[in-house]
Each structure stands twice: as C-alpha cells, then as structure tokens.
Image (cartoon, grey):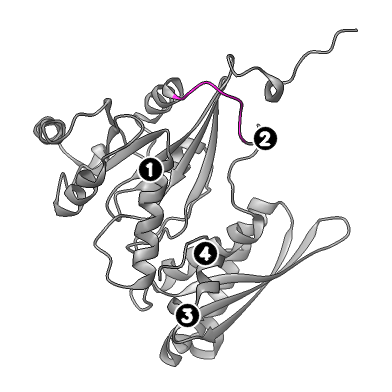
C-alpha cells in the first residue's frame, strides 16, 4: 500500500509560510484585527493604551499557506524602560517579518502617531500593505481623501479597507496576504492557533479582565504572571495560581476592592473565559503583590516575552 504524504510533509514547492507583522500606532485595532484574521481570540483587547506588550503570533491556515500574523505593541515615542522594550519588540517584528501590514484608524487618519510608524517602515523585505481599519465608523466621502493622502506618503503593495470588529474586508485581505508569502514548509502544526503557552494565555486573559474593570483607576504598568499550573489526572480540572504585580500599596487596594469584591469579580470573569478556552473546570487563585520597581527587573521582562533594555 502506498502512503499519502501529510500536508506537513509536503514539499516546499506546494506550501507557503511566512510571518506577517501588524504595525501601527496604539489603539488602532491591531489585536482585534489579529483575532479576526485567525478566527479566534489569541490576543487580548482593551480600551487601554498599550495593552499589547509581547509579540504574539496568531496562526491562520489558508489552503496550502500558513500565515503567521504577529501582533505587536503599538509604536509611540517611549519614555520609560517598559515602553522602550515594547517599541523595540514591535520594530524587531517588522524587520524579521516577510510582510508588514500598516494599520491606520479611519477615524484618526494619518495623525502624528501614524506618521511616526510610517517613517520607520524602511528596510523591509517587501513593500508594506496599507490596511485602513474601522471604515464602518467613517462616512464613505471621507475615506477617499484619506486613502490618497496615505498612498501619497508612501508606496504600498496594496490597500485594503476593513472593519476588524465586523470582519468586513478581512477575507480579501487574508487571501491577498497568503498569496504573497514565500514558498516553504509550514512552521507550526496545522491545528495550532498561537505560539503562546497556556500559562501565558491565562496570564493575558486575567490582565485583560483587570484592565476592563479598572482601566480608569489602574495604570497600564500592572502585570500578571502565572506562578503555578496543576492539572488533574484526567485533565478535566486545572488549578491556576497567578500573581498581579502593582507598583504601589494604593494600587493593591484598588485591585482588591472593598472586602475583596473587585478581585473576586476579576477572577470570576477570567475563570469563565479560561474554562471556555481550556475546555476544563478551572480553579483560579489570584494574589496581589506590590513590587515598586518591577519595571526595572529583567526577570519580569522575560515573563512578558520582552528583551530587557539596558
């Protein structure tokens, strides 16, 4: 009997794979776009500026093409060590990628923050693709002048108008990107959706719930780490222990809330989503610790998947 080769064993001539970095100023919808293109949630979303810290890869299979979308921190002018690490991670992703998407918020247009990113898109492996997001929130009459301004500022390989929230325009973008990738073997298993471990995903989910409930009261510098992960023998129950690090005792009080009600609400929201993702019963235990100078601790950066700026 003759064995049929699996897709993973296909020759380089029949498959494509490549990294596609999603770049843009803070809060233009990069994480929402990533989740839409992958078809499931792999990157957390919040209204808080600079929510995304680490480089997150979301994997989408398009026929014989494996598209490795890289969600990056928003690019801005950094002032603090953590901010420098985030911006460095974004530019490193751009330089390593086979293709870059330059994402612009249609409501904001090419503002100063967008120009900062645009000016940095030099030395890429191929011309970037312009993606104008949130088109459902802008009158059509305003889109054409904006698109002309953007294309006058830089030569793009293509221009796509999308709504990452509704998915409008995303299938066309995905098909175009897949066709542009270099020929080569797939780099991840066919059924894998992200490069993040379950421990890292769990920490990100809790951080998202933290920001959703306290984004006005709590600085974005708070962070979450998964310290312990214990699964039952049958895999149906998981105990997860996490630490929320804040910088001041007053912030610890905000996270805990009166009588511990706030942290209970955060934990409950995170637990429910984790149970859905992990398809198991989750016992989530949250602890809050004050570490005033955690942003100067190289180990914390390693936990976040960032290089420590010296």
Please count the marks in the image.
Answer: 4
Sequence-wise, the earlier of marks 3 and 2 is 2
Confirm or deny contact between disc 3 and disc 2 (CB under 8 A). Answer: no
Q: In which image quadrant can residue 33 be found?
A: top left
Confirm or deny contact between disc 4 and disc 2 (CB under 8 A). Answer: no
- Mark carried by residue 304: 4
- Mark carried by residue 95: 1
The residues bearing labels 3 and 4 have C-alpha atoms spaced at a distance of 12 Å
- Who is closer to the viewer here, 207 or 263? 207
Which structural element holds mark 1? helix
Sequence-wise, the earlier of marks 1 and 4 is 1
- Who is closer to the viewer here, 12 or 132? 12
The N terminus - image quarter: top right
Sequence-wise, the earlier of marks 1 and 2 is 1
Report which residue position mark 3 lands on: 294
Which residue is rendered at x = 16% and y = 44% of the image? 109
Sequence-wise, the earlier of marks 3 and 4 is 3
Confirm or deny contact between disc 1 and disc 3 (CB under 8 A). Answer: no
The C terminus - image quarter: bottom left
Residue at the right extreme?
A: 1
Residue 169 percent location from the top left of the image: 34, 29
The answer, for residue 33, to whether it is visible in the render is: no
The residues bearing labels 1 and 4 have C-alpha atoms spaced at a distance of 20 Å
Which residue is rendered at x = 32% and y = 73% of the image? 80
Which residue is rendered at x = 42% and y = 55% of the image? 45
Report which residue position mark 2 lands on: 189
């Amino acid at each position: 009997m003759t064995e049929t080769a699996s897709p993973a064993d296909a020759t380089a001539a029949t498959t494509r794979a490549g990294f596609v970095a999603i770049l843009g100023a803070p809060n233009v919808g990069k994480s929402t776009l990533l989740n839409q293109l992958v078809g499931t949630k792999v990157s957390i979303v919040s209204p808080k500026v600079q929510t995304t810290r680490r480089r997150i890869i979301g994997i989408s299979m398009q026929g014989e093409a494996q598209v490795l979308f890289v969600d990056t921190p928003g690019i801005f002018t950094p002032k603090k060590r953590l901010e420098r690490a985030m911006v460095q991670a974004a530019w490193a992703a751009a330089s390593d990628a086979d293709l870059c998407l330059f994402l612009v918020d249609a409501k904001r247009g090419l503002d100063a923050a967008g120009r900062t990113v645009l000016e940095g898109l030099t030395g890429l492996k191929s011309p970037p693709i312009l993606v104008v997001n949130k088109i459902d929130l802008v009158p059509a009459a305003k889109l054409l002048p904006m698109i002309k301004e953007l294309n006058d500022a830089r030569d793009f390989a293509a221009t796509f108008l999308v709504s990452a929230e509704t998915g409008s325009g995303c299938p066309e973008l995905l098909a175009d990107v897949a066709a542009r990738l270099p020929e080569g073997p797939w780099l991840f298993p066919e059924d894998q959706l992200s490069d993040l471990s379950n421990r890292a995903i769990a920490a990100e989910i809790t951080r998202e719930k933290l920001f959703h409930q306290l984004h006005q009261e709590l600085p974005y510098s708070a962070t979450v780490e998964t310290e312990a992960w214990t699964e039952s023998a049958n895999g149906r129950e998981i105990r997860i222990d996490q630490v929320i690090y804040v910088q001041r005792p007053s912030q610890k009080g905000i996270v805990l809330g009166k009588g511990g009600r706030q942290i209970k609400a955060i934990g409950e929201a995170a637990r429910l989503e984790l149970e859905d993702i992990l398809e198991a019963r989750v016992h989530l235990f949250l602890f809050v610790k004050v570490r005033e100078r955690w942003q100067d601790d190289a180990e914390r950066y390693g936990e976040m998947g960032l290089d420590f700026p010296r």
